[in-house]
Image (tube, rainbow, N blue to C red):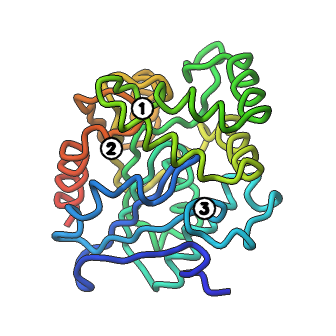
Amino acid sequence: MDILRRNNVKVSGSAGSPVVMLAHGFGCDQNMWGLVAPALAEGFRVVLFDYVGSGGSDPSAWSAERYGSLDGYARDVVEVCEALDLRDVAFVGHSVSAMIGVRAAATAPERISSLVMVGPSPCYIDDDTYRGGFSAEDIDELLESLESNYLGWSAAMAPVIMANPERPELGEELTNSFCATDPAIARVFARTTFLSDSRDELKSVGVPTLVLECAQDVIAPREVGSYVHAAIPGSRLITLDATGHCPQLSAPEATTSAIRAFLRELR
């Protein structure tokens, strides 16, 4: 199979520059990076792609078995790197892609040399010693609502996730992205995302890592950012002066600046 076609891969920037791979989260596609990618392409080689089942990817390549686990998405990342023969990649993962990046880096350490986690959450469900932001009942209700009426769920949840009511166009963009996803695929990806627990994997991260959190985020509250930072040896934590779960849309300049500064220090 043509991996580049399968994952709708697009490359920009100078061929000789350090490589940055931008990975989207649940219900989204590479268009979520539209305000960040062009700026990063000035100094980096930028790789954009869609996970199988998202955006312009080949839907015939999707299977519930493979993509019922974060490992299936991590395989997408590694296979794109292999297809382009990429090494020393800086992987920038938004939301669940932050944890996908952890798995991809563990699987192919020769391919991925640093991680930027934007709004990461290794586990969404609270327990006695951890606050993920949701109770088990909250997640059950979220998944039940999504599975019973995906389009309605998308229209209701996107503005909440974006959390910029004074800029309704941002919520509309996220709603449109959600609604463009096949509901059957979205149901599987949602369960894979919201029921995953990657906390035990954080301590084994061995590459330079930047954790980017927003000052207010209903999906990944600041306690989660602090947890991820504390769990990954030598990581750096930056709190953006931004609201919502998608700073690449709501605060693209600050997001780009933080990513660029971190990556330049590694060169």
Kindly report which numbered mark, 1 or 3, lies closer to the viewer in this rendering: 1
Q: Indicate the quadrant containing the C terminus: top left, top right, bottom left or bottom right.
A: bottom left
Tag 2 residue = 249
Left or right of 157 on screen, residue 1: right
Q: Which mark is residue 74?
A: 3
How far apart are the two marked residues, 2 and 1, measured between alpha carbons? 9 Å
Q: Earlier in the sequence, mark 1 or mark 3?
A: 3
- Residue 73 in picture, x, y percent from top left: 63, 60
**Observer-nearest residue: 267 or 149?**
149
Residue at image location 73% in from the left, 53% down from the top: 185
- Tell me the residue at 22%/28% (across/down): 241
Earlier sequence position, callout 2 versus callout 1:
1
Question: Residue 134's spot in the image, x, y percent?
Answer: 61, 19
Q: Residues within 10 Å of mark 1 (few under 14, many from 20)?
A: many
Q: Quadrant of residue 222?
A: top left
Q: Secondary structure at mark 3?
A: helix
The percent position of residue 219, horizontal first and vertical second, equals: 50, 28
Contact check, label 2 and label 1, Cβ < 8 Å: yes
Q: Could you say where residue 68 lies in the image, as x and y percent from the top left? A: 76, 52
Residue at the image point whose x is 72% and y is 19% from the top: 136
Amino acid type, callout 3? Ala
Look at the numbered disc 1 and give the secondary structure of its residue: helix
- What's the CA distance linking mark 2 and mark 3? 24 Å
Q: Nearer the viewer, residue 167 or 111?
A: 167
